[in-house]
Image (tube, grey):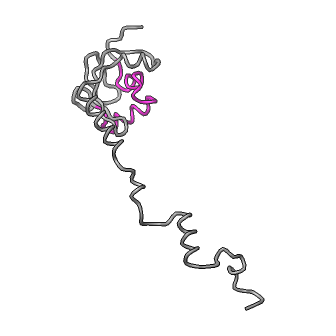
Amino acid sequence: MNTLETMRLDKWLWCARFYKTRSLATEEIGKGRVTVNGQLAKPARDLRRGDTVALRQGPVARTVHVLGLSGARGPAPVAQLLYEETADSIVAREKAAELRRLAPEPAAALHEGRPTKRDRREIDKVSRPGSGDWGSRWSASIDE
């Protein structure tokens, strides 16, 4: 592996597999979700070994120390050697994951609002007896 002194932040985030594409990494940096050594950064900022990177991946916030730089995106086990997550970050991430796991499903609490298709059928059965009968749906009949 080639020894690099510095590397673009967006490329490192992509190589370390924090984001699926470099353009996603650039977008997240542009939105201010990535800081280097406590300061907002631009995608082209030079990253060095020993820097601290704080980032968000969806709802997950992570803080990592840069251990290495790589010129190419490799497999996940190799990418994990490029950084070390801080102990505080690991604890906070696990706590957030546990809270998300224990949180109630928002849809389970919905009892009001627009009825589902199944609810509508049940309402129709109760409110109009015989509504399932084809003949009762038409106003023009010979008998009436």
- Residue 26 lies in magenta, yes or no? yes
Looking at the picture, how far across and down is residue 80, in whole percent? 38, 19
Residue at position x 75%, y 87% in the image: 141
**Quadrant location, the N terminus:** top left
In the rendered image, the vertical position of residue 46 relative to residue 110, given as above or below:
above
Asked which quadrant contains residue 81, the reply is top left
Looking at the picture, how far across and down is residue 125, in whole percent?
58, 73
Residue lying farthest to the right in this orientation: 142
Is residue 142 shown above or below 84? Answer: below
Name the residue rendered at 30%, 15% in the picture. Answer: 67
Farthest residue to the bottom: give it: 144
Quick one: 19 or 125, which is closer to the camera?
A: 125
State the residue at coordinates (73%, 91%).
144
Residue 92 image offset from top left, x and y in percent: 26, 34
Q: Quadrant of residue 124?
A: bottom right
Q: Is 143 placed above or below 107 here?
A: below
Q: Is residue 9 magenta?
A: yes
Please tell me which residue is depicted at 42% across the width and 66% down the height of the picture. 112
Please provide percent x and percent y for residue 138: 70, 82
Please state the extent of the stretch shown in magenta in the rendering. Answer: 7-34
